[in-house]
């Protein structure tokens, strides 16, 4: 029985040593993931500048959501493609800059915060500039590629209230009727 005790102790220590090696914490890849995501975001911006709709939509996961101001959420490739199309016309330019990239410790999710500028031209060729901010949520797919799962932006420009729209011009007939009504009341 005494000869088994050293063997049992050695086996227990070996098992404990082996088990501790199996629970090793995963390597922290956040810095490398941040570099990858920044590079992908830069490539994405170049696709938008080139007005390449297929490449632009290709950065989204299959179940992604694109949240454009003043519109319902576009979910899935077809809806996202439809939502992006107006931003990739010859009379529109869009650029953005990532100010912050933060990768989760688990290295499976990340987000980007930044600013954008959009310029559109009206029918007469007059430019209109919009500036604002955005947030993109990136997720690491099973093949270790990164895809956008949520994308939202909104303007820093003041909203134009509905009642501030240009007032409708009153017809000459309306003005004449008003004058006639005043004269008619004055004569009474």
Image (cartoon, rainbow, N blue to C red):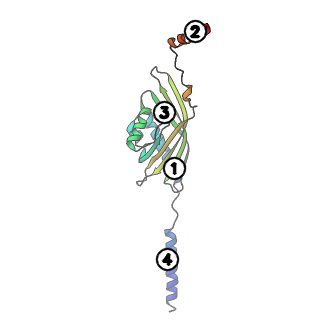
Report, in whole angstroms, how far the alpha carbon at label 4 lies from the one at label 2.
108 Å
* In front of the other: 112 or 14: 112
Hey, which residue is sitting farthest top in the picture?
A: 187
* In front of the other: 95 or 8: 95
Q: Which label was assigned to residue 110? A: 1
Neighbour tally class for label 2: few under 14, some 14-19, many 20 plus, Cα within 10 Å? few
Q: Residue at x 47, y 30 (%)?
A: 93
User: Residue at label 2?
Assistant: 184
Q: Secondary structure at mark 3?
A: strand
Residue 107 rendering spot, x and y as whole percentages: 50, 54
Residues marked 4 and 2 touching at CB (< 8 Å)? no
Hey, which residue is sitting farthest bottom in the picture?
A: 1
Q: Answer with the quarter of the image where residue 131 lies.
A: top right
Precedes in sequence: disc 2 or disc 3: 3
Report, in whole angstroms, how far the alpha carbon at label 2 lies from the one at label 3.
59 Å
Q: Which label was assigned to residue 94? A: 3
Q: Residue at x 53, y 57 (%)?
A: 28
Q: Secondary structure at mark 1?
A: strand
Precedes in sequence: disc 3 or disc 4: 4
Q: Residue at x 52, y 78 (%)?
A: 13
Precedes in sequence: disc 1 or disc 2: 1
Residue 55 rendering spot, x and y as whole percentages: 39, 40
* In front of the other: 84 or 169: 169
Q: Answer with the quarter of the image where residue 133 lies.
A: top right
Q: Secondary structure at mark 2?
A: helix
* In front of the other: 54 or 186: 186
Report, in whole angstroms, how far the alpha carbon at label 1 lies from the one at label 4.
37 Å
User: Residue at label 4?
Assistant: 15
Q: Which label was assigned to residue 53? A: none
Precedes in sequence: disc 1 or disc 4: 4
Relative vertical location of residue 183 with respect to residue 99 in this rendering, above or below: above
Q: Please tell me whether mark 3 or mark 4 is closer to you in this view.
A: 3
């Amino acid at each position: 029985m005494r000869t088994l005790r050293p063997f049992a102790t050695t086996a227990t220590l070996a098992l404990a040593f082996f088990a501790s090696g199996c629970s090793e914490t995963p390597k922290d890849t956040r810095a490398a993931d941040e570099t990858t995501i920044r590079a992908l975001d830069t490539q994405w911006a170049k696709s938008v500048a080139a007005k390449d709709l297929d490449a632009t939509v290709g950065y989204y996961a299959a179940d992604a959501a694109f949240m454009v101001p003043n519109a319902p959420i576009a979910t899935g490739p077809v809806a996202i493609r439809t939502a992006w199309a107006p931003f990739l016309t010859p009379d529109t330019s869009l650029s953005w800059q990532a100010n912050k990239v933060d990768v989760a410790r688990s290295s499976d999710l990340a987000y980007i915060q930044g600013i954008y500028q959009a310029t559109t031209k009206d029918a007469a060729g007059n430019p209109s500039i919009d500036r604002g901010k955005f947030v993109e949520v990136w997720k690491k797919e099973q093949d270790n590629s990164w895809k956008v799962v949520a994308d939202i932006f909104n303007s820093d420009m003041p909203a134009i209230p509905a009642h501030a729209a240009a007032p409708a011009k009153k017809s000459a007939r309306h003005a004449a009727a008003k004058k006639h009504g005043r004269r008619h009341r004055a004569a009474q």
